[in-house]
Protein backbone atom coordinates (compact mmCIF):
# COMPACT_ATOMS: atom_id res chain seq x y z
CA UNK A 1 0.00 0.00 0.00
CA UNK A 2 1.28 3.44 -0.96
CA UNK A 3 0.66 6.49 1.21
CA UNK A 4 1.15 10.24 0.89
CA UNK A 5 2.89 11.72 3.94
CA UNK A 6 2.79 15.48 4.36
CA UNK A 7 2.84 18.15 7.03
CA UNK A 8 2.79 21.87 7.71
CA UNK A 9 0.40 22.96 4.96
CA UNK A 10 -0.25 26.28 6.76
CA UNK A 11 -3.32 27.10 4.61
CA UNK A 12 -1.46 26.72 1.29
CA UNK A 13 -4.38 25.06 -0.49
CA UNK A 14 -2.95 24.89 -4.05
CA UNK A 15 0.24 23.18 -2.82
CA UNK A 16 -1.65 20.72 -0.62
CA UNK A 17 -4.06 19.89 -3.42
CA UNK A 18 -1.25 19.43 -5.95
CA UNK A 19 0.65 17.07 -3.64
CA UNK A 20 -2.35 14.82 -3.05
CA UNK A 21 -3.28 14.89 -6.73
CA UNK A 22 0.28 13.77 -7.61
CA UNK A 23 0.31 11.13 -4.87
CA UNK A 24 -3.02 9.69 -5.99
CA UNK A 25 -1.76 9.52 -9.58
CA UNK A 26 1.27 7.59 -8.27
CA UNK A 27 -0.98 5.09 -6.49
CA UNK A 28 -1.43 6.50 -2.96
CA UNK A 29 -4.35 4.91 -1.13
CA UNK A 30 -4.26 7.17 1.97
CA UNK A 31 -2.93 10.54 3.14
CA UNK A 32 -1.20 11.22 6.47
CA UNK A 33 -1.07 14.90 7.53
CA UNK A 34 1.31 15.50 10.46
CA UNK A 35 -0.10 18.81 11.64
CA UNK A 36 -0.18 22.55 11.16
CA UNK A 37 -3.17 22.60 8.85
CA UNK A 38 -4.23 25.93 10.48
CA UNK A 39 -7.71 26.65 9.01
CA UNK A 40 -9.73 23.41 8.81
CA UNK A 41 -11.41 24.69 5.63
CA UNK A 42 -8.03 24.16 3.94
CA UNK A 43 -8.77 20.43 3.97
CA UNK A 44 -11.92 20.66 1.83
CA UNK A 45 -9.70 20.53 -1.27
CA UNK A 46 -8.79 16.92 -0.37
CA UNK A 47 -12.35 15.59 -0.39
CA UNK A 48 -12.36 15.36 -4.20
CA UNK A 49 -9.71 12.63 -4.16
CA UNK A 50 -11.81 10.24 -2.05
CA UNK A 51 -8.74 8.97 -0.17
CA UNK A 52 -8.79 8.49 3.60
CA UNK A 53 -6.96 11.44 5.18
CA UNK A 54 -5.59 10.99 8.72
CA UNK A 55 -4.90 14.34 10.40
CA UNK A 56 -3.39 15.48 13.68
CA UNK A 57 -2.92 19.04 14.82
CA UNK A 58 0.39 20.74 15.44
CA UNK A 59 1.34 23.95 17.20
CA UNK A 60 -0.54 26.09 14.64
CA UNK A 61 -3.87 24.48 15.35
CA UNK A 62 -6.49 26.91 14.08
CA UNK A 63 -10.09 26.08 15.03
CA UNK A 64 -9.97 22.65 16.73
CA UNK A 65 -13.74 22.53 17.11
CA UNK A 66 -14.23 22.98 13.36
CA UNK A 67 -11.45 20.46 12.67
CA UNK A 68 -13.14 17.92 14.95
CA UNK A 69 -16.50 18.44 13.25
CA UNK A 70 -14.94 18.14 9.80
CA UNK A 71 -13.05 15.01 10.82
CA UNK A 72 -16.22 13.31 12.03
CA UNK A 73 -18.56 14.25 9.19
CA UNK A 74 -20.66 11.19 8.27
CA UNK A 75 -19.38 9.68 5.04
CA UNK A 76 -16.37 12.03 5.00
CA UNK A 77 -12.82 11.01 4.13
CA UNK A 78 -11.11 13.19 6.77
CA UNK A 79 -10.23 11.60 10.13
CA UNK A 80 -9.02 13.98 12.83
CA UNK A 81 -7.16 12.17 15.62
CA UNK A 82 -6.16 15.01 17.96
CA UNK A 83 -2.55 15.73 18.93
CA UNK A 84 -1.24 12.32 17.86
CA UNK A 85 -2.46 9.05 16.38
CA UNK A 86 -1.65 5.39 16.30
CA UNK A 87 -3.14 3.77 13.20
CA UNK A 88 -2.66 0.64 11.13
CA UNK A 89 -2.47 0.73 7.35
CA UNK A 90 -1.23 -1.91 4.94
CA UNK A 91 -0.36 -4.19 7.85
CA UNK A 92 2.00 -1.58 9.34
CA UNK A 93 1.74 0.13 12.72
CA UNK A 94 2.04 3.88 12.15
CA UNK A 95 2.33 6.72 14.66
CA UNK A 96 1.68 10.37 13.73
CA UNK A 97 2.86 13.29 15.81
CA UNK A 98 3.85 16.84 14.97
CA UNK A 99 7.07 17.20 16.94
CA UNK A 100 10.32 15.47 15.84
CA UNK A 101 11.63 14.92 19.40
CA UNK A 102 8.38 13.15 20.34
CA UNK A 103 8.59 11.14 17.10
CA UNK A 104 12.13 9.97 17.88
CA UNK A 105 11.00 8.81 21.31
CA UNK A 106 8.05 6.88 19.87
CA UNK A 107 10.28 5.24 17.25
CA UNK A 108 12.59 4.05 20.05
CA UNK A 109 9.77 2.08 21.73
CA UNK A 110 9.61 -0.60 19.06
CA UNK A 111 5.82 -0.34 19.02
CA UNK A 112 5.72 1.26 15.56
CA UNK A 113 6.97 0.33 12.10
CA UNK A 114 6.71 3.93 10.90
CA UNK A 115 6.65 7.19 12.82
CA UNK A 116 5.77 10.39 10.93
CA UNK A 117 6.22 13.96 12.12
CA UNK A 118 6.57 17.54 10.90
CA UNK A 119 7.22 20.92 12.57
CA UNK A 120 10.81 21.52 11.43
CA UNK A 121 9.89 22.20 7.77
CA UNK A 122 12.90 20.04 6.87
CA UNK A 123 12.74 16.66 5.16
CA UNK A 124 14.27 13.85 7.20
CA UNK A 125 14.04 10.12 6.54
CA UNK A 126 15.89 7.86 8.97
CA UNK A 127 15.89 4.32 10.27
CA UNK A 128 16.21 4.42 14.05
CA UNK A 129 17.13 1.46 16.26
CA UNK A 130 14.55 0.61 18.90
CA UNK A 131 14.56 -1.23 22.22
CA UNK A 132 13.33 -4.50 20.68
CA UNK A 133 16.45 -4.83 18.55
CA UNK A 134 14.96 -3.76 15.22
CA UNK A 135 14.57 -0.44 13.46
CA UNK A 136 11.66 1.92 12.86
CA UNK A 137 11.32 4.33 9.97
CA UNK A 138 11.11 7.98 11.00
CA UNK A 139 9.75 10.24 8.24
CA UNK A 140 9.47 14.03 8.35
CA UNK A 141 8.14 15.15 4.95
CA UNK A 142 9.12 18.79 5.47
CA UNK A 143 6.48 21.40 4.63
CA UNK A 144 3.97 21.05 1.81
CA UNK A 145 3.18 24.71 2.47
CA UNK A 146 6.70 25.67 1.43
CA UNK A 147 6.90 27.81 4.55
CA UNK A 148 9.81 30.25 4.58
CA UNK A 149 12.54 29.76 2.03
CA UNK A 150 12.10 25.99 1.97
CA UNK A 151 10.75 23.89 -0.87
CA UNK A 152 7.19 22.54 -0.80
CA UNK A 153 7.78 18.84 -0.13
CA UNK A 154 5.90 15.62 0.61
CA UNK A 155 6.86 11.95 0.83
CA UNK A 156 5.43 8.93 -0.95
CA UNK A 157 5.73 5.85 1.23
CA UNK A 158 5.38 2.25 0.12
CA UNK A 159 4.31 0.25 3.17
CA UNK A 160 5.12 -3.09 1.52
CA UNK A 161 8.76 -2.24 0.77
CA UNK A 162 9.11 0.50 3.43
CA UNK A 163 10.65 2.78 0.82
CA UNK A 164 10.12 6.55 1.14
CA UNK A 165 10.65 9.01 -1.71
CA UNK A 166 10.69 12.79 -1.45
CA UNK A 167 8.63 14.82 -3.94
CA UNK A 168 8.43 18.57 -4.54
CA UNK A 169 5.58 20.80 -5.67
CA UNK A 170 6.47 24.03 -7.41
CA UNK A 171 5.59 26.97 -5.21
CA UNK A 172 4.78 28.88 -8.40
CA UNK A 173 1.41 27.06 -8.44
CA UNK A 174 0.15 29.52 -5.84
CA UNK A 175 1.31 32.54 -7.81
CA UNK A 176 -0.18 31.16 -11.03
CA UNK A 177 -3.58 30.81 -9.34
CA UNK A 178 -3.42 34.32 -7.88
CA UNK A 179 -2.75 35.68 -11.35
CA UNK A 180 -5.85 33.88 -12.69
CA UNK A 181 -8.16 35.46 -10.10
Image (cartoon, helix red, strand yellow):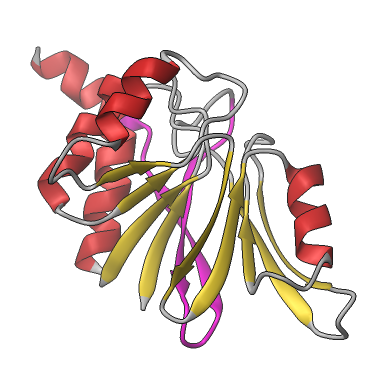
Q: Is 152 within the magenta?
A: yes
Q: Quadrant of residue 156?
A: bottom left
Residues shaded magenta:
149-172
Q: Specify whether 54 is left or right of 56.
A: left
**Residue 12, can we see it?**
no
Q: Quadrant of the C terminus?
A: top left
Q: Specify whether 90 is left or right of 27.
A: right
Figure check: 127 above or below 49: below
Q: Position of residue 59 (x, y in %)?
A: 62, 22
Figure check: 30 above or below 84: below
Q: Is 37 within the magenta?
A: no
Q: Position of residue 140 (x, y in %)?
A: 63, 51
Q: Quadrant of residue 179?
A: top left
Q: Position of residue 174 (x, y in %)?
A: 28, 25
What residue is shown at x 74% (from left), y 44% (from top)?
A: 100
Q: Quadrant of residue 111?
A: bottom right
Q: Quadrant of the N terminus?
A: bottom left
Q: Specify whether 69 is left or right of 106.
A: left
Figure check: 25 above or below 117: below
Q: Specify whether 130 is left or right of 29.
A: right
Q: How many marks?
A: 0
Figure check: 37 above or below 181: below
What residue is shown at x 26% (from left), y 29% (from top)?
A: 70
Along the line of sight, which residue is nearer the eye, 147 or 71? 71
**Residue 145, can we see it?**
yes
What residue is shown at x 46% (from left), y 41% (from top)?
A: 81
Along the line of sight, which residue is nearer the eye, 159 or 89? 89
Amino acid sequence: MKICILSDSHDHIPLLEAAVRDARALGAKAVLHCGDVVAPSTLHCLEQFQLPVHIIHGNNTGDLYALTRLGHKPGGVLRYHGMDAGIELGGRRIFLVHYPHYARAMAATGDWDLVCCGHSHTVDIEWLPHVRGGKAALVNPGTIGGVGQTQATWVMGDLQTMRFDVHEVSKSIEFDQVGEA
